[in-house]
Amino acid sequence: MSPYAQLPTVPTSSELEGVGDDTWLEVIHKMEEVYSELVADEVELEAKNTQLEQSQQFIFSLISAMSDVLIACNRDGVIEETNAALCTLVGLPEVELRGRNVTDLLADAQSVQRWQLATFHAASHEMAPVEINLRDATGQAIPVDMNCTPRLDSNGHAVGQVLVGRPMGELKRAYRQLREAHDALKTAQQQLLQSEKMASLGRLVAGVAHELNNPISFVLGNVHVLQRYSQRVAQYLQAVHQTDLPAPLQALRQELRIDRLLDDLPSLMEGTIEGAQRTTEIVNGLKRFSSTGKEEVAPVELNALVERAIHWVQKGTAPRFEIHWTHGSDCCVQGNAGQLLQVLMNLIQNASDAAASSPQPALHISLTRRADQVELRFADNGPGIAPENLARVFDPFFTTKAVGKGTGLGLSISYGIVEQHGGQLACNNGPEGGAVFALRLPLPSTT
């Protein structure tokens, strides 16, 4: 009942005659009560209006802040409410979107069919996710993953639909970022595993190198002594041969080929010394590989180093290996010349071994200089590297060569040397076949 219904009717002048003071006081008191109730109702109404405005502002801020597109439409698909995300996507202001049918925003007939199917299921209070194409501001179709749910009135009757969707481009970008993060994690795990392998190998190599040093020292020392002894023996025999020897001794001299033996001894001694020295260099390389300290570095000219490596490999084990290399402009890096030469010789020797089965084994070496690094590429015409072995090429003791033909340490040691120089050593298969190794080293700063 309205409070105004409680107000007494205004009496006429004739009726007021004879009314006592008590009656007047009662009327005034009643009017004060009614006025107080009116003031209280007005305060409560204002509070509810403020609360309603705050709720509306809160809902509006949520809708505006949504990155997903929002469409509220009636049962016929006419848009009644939307948000800024949809306006940005389709390039239309909100006032122009209201009153339009949802189908006006769809890019193709297939999307219209999907939308109609989704609204049919939404009418039965079921979630109906569907992928539809909206037409963006440029007229291009944008795939949107849309969820359609019924919109109910205060009595629980369906009066329309609410559509909330996210452009698939954002999902694809999120998936791509997730995949990149996963790949980066896998790479980090592989590098950690490789580092652990290299550390274990370093401890093993340190012990092996120490054990090898002693016999190598014996060999070098004894060969040097034998070299001096052979000189003395040769000098003595030369003096003896200048005398008149009996016929039996002359025959024995011819039978034992003493002269041929004396001629071969110096080269045999030099070959033994060279082999022992090369073994010493290999052991020193193993020691450097296992050492945590850095070797002395100096400017190293790569062109000269490459030509030196080619010369030694062709002179040694691959005289008929065809190597294509063109001397470029001077290119210096900071490093240890001996270690880098070891890496280059190993890469060239491996290419020679890999291409040995080709009719004309060949290797192409190229040098590319960039702003902050230089890259040496070694591309052979061999069979290439099996895909399952690409990730294991630099593992210690891994080799595809026959037993007795390789230890599997060359590339592993080279990998460690390049890392110590701040560079990278990578491998892959060339587009036309054959293996391709890329050696990248940092160039010294010009500042």
Image (cartoon, helix red, strand yellow):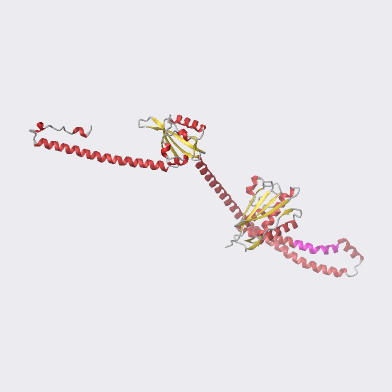
Using the rendered view, name the quadrant where residue 330 is placed: bottom right
Q: Which is more toward the observer, 242 or 249?
A: 242
Give the residue displayed 47% in from the left and 39% down from the top.
Answer: 90
Residue 385, horizontal then vertical, whole percent:
67, 47
The quarter of the rendered structure image containing the C terminus is: bottom right
Give the residue displayed 49% in from the left and 32% down from the top.
Answer: 112
Q: Can you say whether 266 is above or below 107 in the image?
A: below
Q: Is residue 376 magenta?
A: no
Q: Which is more toward the observer, 25 or 424?
A: 25
Q: Which residues are magenta?
A: 257-272
Q: Can you say whether 417 is above or below 97 in the image?
A: below
Res 82 seen here: no
Q: Residue furthest left?
A: 18
- Report the side of 29 relative to 204 (left or right): left
Residue 95, horizontal then vertical, whole percent:
41, 38
- Tell me the chief SS of the magenta region: helix
Count how many numbered circles sit on residues in the image. Answer: 0
Residue 356, horizontal then vertical, whole percent:
74, 49
The quarter of the rendered structure image containing the N terminus is: top left
Give the residue displayed 19% in from the left and 33% down from the top.
Answer: 6
Residue 74, horizontal then vertical, whole percent:
41, 32
- Report the side of 257 relative to 353 (left or right): right
Q: Which is more toward the observer, 251 or 399?
A: 399
